[in-house]
Amino acid sequence: MWVARTSSSQGAAAVTTSDLVGLRIKTVRRQRGLSQAQLAHPELSDSYVSLIESGKRTPTPAVLELLAAKLDCSLSYLINGVTAEQMEDIELALGYARLALENGEVTEARTRFAELLENSNLSGLTSLRQEAEFGLALATEAAGDLDEAISLMLRLREEELPQERGLEVAIALCRAYRESERLHEAVEVGERLLIGDTREPWTDLRVELGATLLMAYYERGDMLRARQFAAELLNAADALGTPRAIVAANWNASIVARAAGHYDEAVAFIERALAVQLEHGQPRNTARMRVQAARTKLRTGAQDPATVRTVLHAAIREFEQTSTSTIDQAILYLELACAEYMSGDLDEAAEHAAKCRDLLPRYGHVSGAEANLLLGRIYGAAGQVDEAREHAAAVERWLRPLPDSRRSASHWYATAETMEQLGDTDRAVEAYQRALACAGL
């Protein structure tokens, strides 16, 4: 076996198993026809080389560099058992997988990450393997397979991870739980790292995790906690002064402010977030934030439906070119359907509401309930009462699996109102009763 030589600056942290390192040194030394004394001379003693080869001594980074040079092999091979060419192939494959995910080619990204993880050479490269596993989890989430994405993230979280990687995994896991309507687990993940007797200083990643936790509070209906925590995040982001923290805090604080009826605050927060995002942010979050800004302005009356509709149609192209998840896409089409309904374009509104619903996992997702409720109103406005009642009744199938919360109560109440308007009195009464139960009344 010929092992190519390459320069490297990898440190001692990469040396994980001294006996494997020693075995590789012995193997290459014998392939080169060298004795231990010849390899050692003049810098080292032959007894020291013998101890390294037997795994009884762990060589320092400097000694490893020296031995790699004397053996004319790559340092990466001595440390990880991977040649320079193999390492280059792995890094190239990882780069292609990352690029596919960033460009919204979710299926391609998922395939590439999965194929990379089947490469036996990756097993000894802990950092790169963890990056590939996290990439697979993100691609799986983006494809809408939330249960599998959560499973992948939980397995990864069981490992010893660098601090930043651990926070990234926590953010994605908290988000995936929230998107799955598993709000208790989402809160638990966020609070485990952020809430406690000894708090770590705020960083960009900790603010992002906080913003994800904030949405779990909001969706759980804990508005008092959400308002308090939003204020804490905004203060932390302002103290940091970094674009990433400012965007995360203002983005989700806007949603909480709108839900609390503070419309001017909601618009101000989202406009600040979008302005910073456009200057500094990544395409995926820029596309998602345009939708959130349009949603806020539409629902607070800060912008007319026709203008919002134009913005959302442009956002479709952005979504197609980035790694937005199917949940993100569903929300985009739901907001577009709302804008078209308010503009009087009922056919387009129905088409996009149906597209939203079809993108979501069935059942137990609040956006699916909102889509069916909107379809009920659209068909009711068109005079097609039977179809309207059918869609309104379908809301129940989406809401029943969800936990009781103020958020669920508001959707049950809206469903009851719609059914009442459509003349379906019995179902309206049932929906009103369900709304009261969810509110704890």
Image (spheres, grey):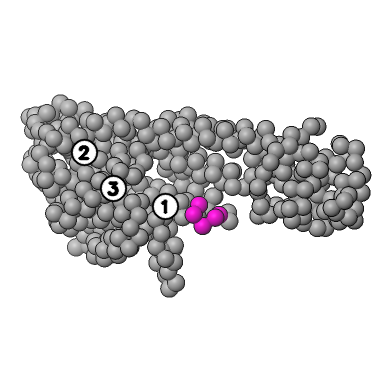
Q: Which residue is labeled 1 in the image? A: 171
Residue 40 vs 112, above or below: the answer is below
Q: Earlier in the sequence, mark 2 or mark 3?
A: 3
Residue drawn 17% across and 50% down? Answer: 267
Which SS class for mark 2? Answer: helix
Give the number of the disc on residue 276. 3
Residue at figure coordinates x 84%, y 53% from the top left: 43
Magenta stretch mostly in which secondary structure?
helix
Q: Is residue 305 left or right of residue 14?
A: left
The picture quadrant where one finds residue 186 is bottom left
The percent position of residue 386, horizontal first and vertical second, equals 13, 31
Q: Earlier in the sequence, mark 3 or mark 1?
A: 1
**What is the C-alpha distance between the residues marked 2 and 3?**
23 Å
Q: Mark 1 falls on what kind of element?
A: helix
Is residue 7 highlighted in magenta? no
First to last magenta residue range: 161-165
Picture coordinates of residue 21, whole percent (x, y): 77, 48
